[in-house]
Image (cartoon, rainbow, N blue to C red):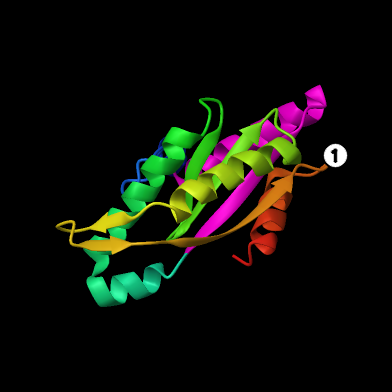
Amino acid sequence: MTGAYANSRHPSITDGLTELYSFGFLHIHLAPQVAEAEFAEKPLTMYLYDIKGLKSINRVRGYAAGDALLRQIAGVVERLVRGEDLAARYGADRFCVVLPDTDAEYAETVLQRILSVISNTEFVIRDGANLVHLVMKSALAERNRGETAEALIKRAAAGANI
């Protein structure tokens, strides 16, 4: 009975707040993507980014304001990535995008486009009277030959100081 129960529990596919893929979904589906890229000898790149100052916004303006910002950022990211890319919430104020069949050079272009849109957008908090400009820190990692999904995540996280 315990085994049947354990096998029936799957991490949620989407993050309840942002509606991007969840951290659990990322971890489950990145390993097969890495294995497929290794087998096909194709590139796979991921980047992590971190929203600077979200803790301060939560403290000063409340968690509802921070949650609204997270939802808005997720919406921007979702509109700027391709259908085959995997955009996920990595943690509290952290996001991840996995780009299959994409080398670091092209992924850098995608990353800069997202960061540019976010840094040049005035995000609305509550009634529209409060506008916020956000700063994001990011790191990009292209899969190395023989590298596991966990190693790729760890390398990207180290680059972003996450």
64 is higher (above) or lower (below) than 145:
below
Magenta segment, principal secondary structure? helix
**Of 95 and 13, the residue lying toward us:** 95
In the picture, measured across the screen, residue 62 lies left or right of residue 148, that is left
Q: Based on the displayed image, in which of its 4 quarters is residue 70 positioned? A: bottom left
Residue at left offset 29%, top offset 76%:
59
Q: Is residue 25 visible?
A: yes
Whether residue 34 appears in magenta in the rendering, the answer is yes
Return the residue at label 1: 145
Whether 116 is drawn above or below 21: the answer is: below
Q: Quadrant of residue 38?
A: top right
- Residue 109 sits above or below residue 131 on the image: above
The residues colored magenta run 22-51
Residue occupying image coordinates x 33% and y 48%? 72
Residue 111: % across, % down: 60, 45
Q: Position of residue 31 (x, y in %)?
A: 66, 37
